[in-house]
Image (cartoon, helix red, strand yellow):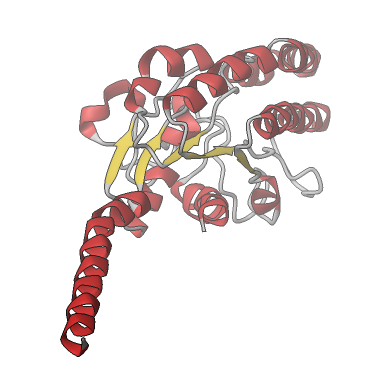
Amino acid sequence: MRRSRISLLASAVAGTAAVLLALTPAATAATATNYVALGDSYSSGVGAGNYISTSGDCLRSTSGYPYLWYDQHTVSSFKFVACSGATTTDVINNQISALSTSTTLVSITIGGNDVGFAQVMEDCNLYGTDTCVAEVNAAENTARTQLPGWLDNLYSQIHSRAPYAKVVVLGYPRFYDLSAWYCPGLSSTSRSKINEGADVLDGVISTEVSRYGFSFADVRSSFADGHEICDYNKWLHSVDWSDITQSYHPYASGYSGGYLPAMDAKTG
């Protein structure tokens, strides 16, 4: 009788061990981080330098927040497909194929190019206050009336392709410290209107993000803490006629000091 009990106990222990061993690979796979970085120039890292030569005109930088996050975390796979100039349509056509059911983390900035961000900022510098105010108003109208539908289309496709992923949508900073005592260039009216446009854009994005259960990472307060254009320790390029592409994009310090902490706060 005793031997039978011992045999049964041994069999039970062996069976439990076998079950645990069988589950271990699945548990390990479940915790693996498969990260895909989508988006526009604020995700590719324009303005930071250190561009990856193979990224071409997409200007993906090792000093952009996606690469910094990847470099500082244990990641099983990393696909960096963000591209300078991308719109929601570009992400759908050229980037989301990088997603799959095994993707566990997605980051993205998107929407600025859909409302004509680059052209607005160029015209504000070239044609003065009246043009600037009018074009920001037009961009705000596009953001309120058309951008929600474009974002819905994109977000639904991200969710469909990567249903188990945590999706972090990062916003855009305000550009100007309106309290700065000295700020050459654009008029105070133009600077104030541009900041308003950033707030409208971020507001539309955060509203759409909440509909999908994604996380919105707001970077405005970080940049507003002494790091906007006109601040001594600014994290943003002003207009740069020698390299217009990097105008109104973060320096490397803006990605590491503003965007990376916002990403970290949403990913743990």
Residue shown at the point (56%, 42%) measured from the top left: 236
Residue shown at the point (25%, 72%) measured from the top left: 12
Quadrant hosting residue 154: top right
Residue at the extreme bottom: 2
Marks counted in the figure total: 0
Q: Is residue 157 above or below residue 175?
A: above
Locate residue 22, reporting x and y percent.
23, 57
Image position of 57 (left or right of 119)? left
Q: Is residue 179 above or below residue 187?
A: below
Image position of 165 (left or right of 124)? left
Locate residue 19, reporting x and y percent.
26, 61
Locate residue 44, reporting x and y percent.
41, 33
Give the position of the N terminus as an image quadrant: bottom left
| Nearest the eye: 84 or 167 | 167
Q: Does residue 46 show up?
A: no
| Nearest the eye: 255 or 165 | 165
Locate residue 56, reporting x and y percent.
27, 24
Residue shown at the point (75%, 31%) measured from the top left: 203
Quadrant hosting residue 168: top right
| Nearest the eye: 230 or 108 | 108
Quadrant hosting residue 9: bottom left
Q: Does residue 160 show up?
A: yes
| Nearest the eye: 178 or 204 | 204
Image position of 197 (left or right of 223)? right
